[in-house]
Image: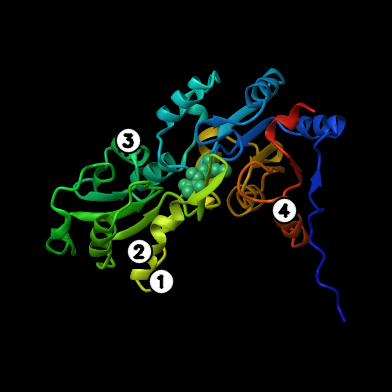
Amino acid sequence: MSSAAAPSRAAPRKLTGKKEEIDAFIDRFDTFLFDCDGVLWQGNHLLPKVVETLEMLRSKGKKLIFVTNNSTKSRAAYSSKFTTFGIPVSVDEIFGSAYSTAVCLARVLKIPKDKRVFVIGEAGIEEELSAEGIQHFGGTQPLWFPEDEVAEHAGPDPSVSAVVVGLDRHISYAKLALAFGYLQDPAVHFFATNVDSTFPTHGKLLPGAGSCSAPLTYMLGGRAPTAFGKPSPAMMESIERRYTLDKSCACMVGDRLNTDIKFGIDGGLAGTLAVLTGVSTEKEILKAGEAGEGPDVYLDCLGDMLG
Ligand SMILES: O=C(O)[C@H](O)[C@H](O)COP(=O)(O)O
Ligand SMILES: [Mg+2]
């Protein structure tokens, strides 16, 4: 009986406490793509030794790019968040899913600018769409009618070209009803900044962006959104173009197997490093490794890169 095909990738190696091996791993790369939630922080709680680790990598001349699926903040807002932690990061070093989505809509898909985009999501999406000159409504805007008048306002609207859904911590029945009304016209695009099922914050898992768009997929009989965040190839292509990324010496650092690590592997990056301070567990990482879908190496936390 033929054995299952051996994965082409080696099993994930845990490097916590192995300074020489960590240093040798770091030396293989000149660029590190960093996920944020669950790697650098959980909500507003910075994880251990993150400042020192990023400083160490910069002192080695490494290029850092921060690639987050969290669309609640724009690149500028993330730059400010980094500053509050004492970490200087320019807007140009940040590539979030809200930005990736806005750029794709404006410059790749060239959606019509005389029409509107309905947003289920937060300020990050609104600010990045505005920066690309795309008209939008919904989002953080207060409802413009009483909750009991949803039926009168729900339904197709020829001025709407697309619905964009990201993490929306103020999601509501009315928002879903309006989005459903617009999307019943198959010509209206259904986009998601990302479809992460859960959101790691303050040591817990909360509903993620994907859980905000999934009800619409259910209502629409299975129609899924086009997602622009990790692990989508569109995001990797955008990053490659923007940073003239040499993938042969780039490493993805993340906490989630089905977004960050998949993004790195499928995107052809030379290395992937997982940390255990976010979503994926050590057991899940080792199991994924059996199928060749695990990271090259993993650590208990990012600060362990200091050895
Ligand atoms: O639900 C979400 O949007 C995600 O869980 C979250 O924001 C992921 O952010 P990342 O780990 O990519 O920084
Ligand atoms: Mg993460």
Report, in whole angstroms, how far the alpha carbon at label 2 lies from the one at label 1: 8 Å
Residue 1 x %, y %: 87, 82
Q: Return the residue found at the far bottom.
A: 1
Q: Is mark 3 within 8 Å of ligand 1?
A: no
> Is residue 278 rendered to the left or right of residue 306?
left
Going by the numbered disc 1, the residue's amino acid type is: Gly
Report, in whole angstroms, how far the alpha carbon at label 3 lies from the one at label 4: 35 Å
Going by the numbered disc 2, the residue's amino acid type is: Leu
Badge 3: residue crowd in 10 Å (few <14, some 14–19, many ≥20): many
Q: Return the residue found at the far front.
A: 203
Badge 1: residue crowd in 10 Å (few <14, some 14–19, many ≥20): few
Q: Earlier in the sequence, mark 1 or mark 4?
A: 1
Which residue is found at the position 53% from the left and 22% from the top? 85
Asked if residue 231 can be seen in this view, the reply is yes
Going by the numbered disc 4, the residue's amino acid type is: Ile
Q: Find numbered disc 3 in the image and state the secondary structure of the residue it sits on.
A: helix
Q: Earlier in the sequence, mark 3 or mark 4?
A: 3
Residue 112 x %, y %: 25, 50
Asked if residue 69 can be seen in this view, the reply is no
Please name which of the two marks, 3 or 2, marks the residue nearer to the observer: 2
Whether tag 3 and tag 4 are in contact, CB under 8 A, the answer is no
- Give the labeled residue for mark 3: 127
Query: Which of the pair 234/5 is nearer the observer?
Result: 5
Q: Determine which quarter of the picture holds residue 41.
A: top right
Q: Earlier in the sequence, mark 1 or mark 3?
A: 3
Please name which of the two marks, 3 or 4, marks the residue nearer to the observer: 4
- Give the labeled residue for mark 4: 285
Badge 2: residue crowd in 10 Å (few <14, some 14–19, many ≥20): many
- Give the labeled residue for mark 1: 222
- Give the labeled residue for mark 2: 216
Report, in whole angstroms, how far the alpha carbon at label 1 lies from the one at label 3: 30 Å
Q: Find numbered disc 2 in the image and state the secondary structure of the residue it sits on.
A: helix
